[in-house]
Amino acid sequence: MKIITMVLTAVALLTISSSGFALLPGKAEDGRPLHDNFCMGCHVSMQGDDGSAIYLRSNRRVNSIEGLMGQVAFCNEQIRAGLNEYEIDDIVAYLNEAFYRFEID
């Protein structure tokens, strides 16, 4: 049941129209420490080095701001980090500013 809920949450985030994301609600400066604390351990184990290669690889999964939002929400559920929606928004803002640089209308 939890897997279905996680998948539905990720799909819902991915299918929301981009017009709803005129501005990212999170704060990148608050997202960095959350990212470093909750995300980097897994990313280092997957990619080695400092883990940032996961964002820079040519075959990365995330190709839009909606995809980034969905991926962060999915990872939160997968590792049971317990991040709230504001913390997830902060991590998304940090990742977009630091790595992805998706255009936001």
Image: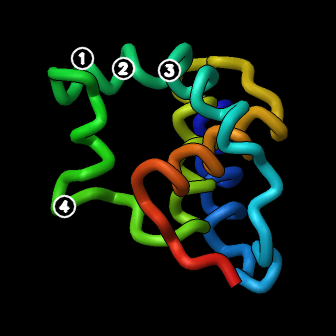
- Three-letter code, disc 1: Ser
In this picture, is 80 found above or below 103?
Answer: above
Circle 4 Cα neighbour tier, 10 Å, few/some/many (<14 / 14–19 / ≥20): few
Residue denoted by label 3: 36
Which corner quadrant holds the N terminus?
top right
Horizontally, residue 25 falls left or right of residue 56, namely: right
In this view, the residue in front, 75 or 35, is: 35
Residue 99, x across and y down, in percent? 40, 52
First reached walking from the N terminus: tag 1 or tag 3: 3
Residue 27, x across and y down, in percent? 75, 44
Residue denoted by label 2: 42
Mark 1 residue element: helix
For the residues labelled 1 and 2, the Cα–Cα distance comes to 5 Å
Horizontally, residue 36 falls left or right of residue 27, namely: left
Do the residues bearing badges 3 and 2 touch, measured as CB atoms within 8 Å?
Answer: no
Circle 1 Cα neighbour tier, 10 Å, few/some/many (<14 / 14–19 / ≥20): few
First reached walking from the N terminus: tag 4 or tag 1: 1
In this view, the residue in front, 101 or 84, is: 101
First reached walking from the N terminus: tag 3 or tag 4: 3
Res 66 → quadrant: bottom right
Res 32 → quadrant: top right
Do the residues bearing badges 1 and 2 touch, measured as CB atoms within 8 Å?
Answer: yes
The numbered dot on residue 59 is: 4
* Residue drawn at the location 27% of the way across and 57% of the way down: 60
For the residues labelled 4 and 1, the Cα–Cα distance comes to 18 Å
For the residues labelled 4 and 2, the Cα–Cα distance comes to 18 Å
Residue 1, visible in the rendered structure: no
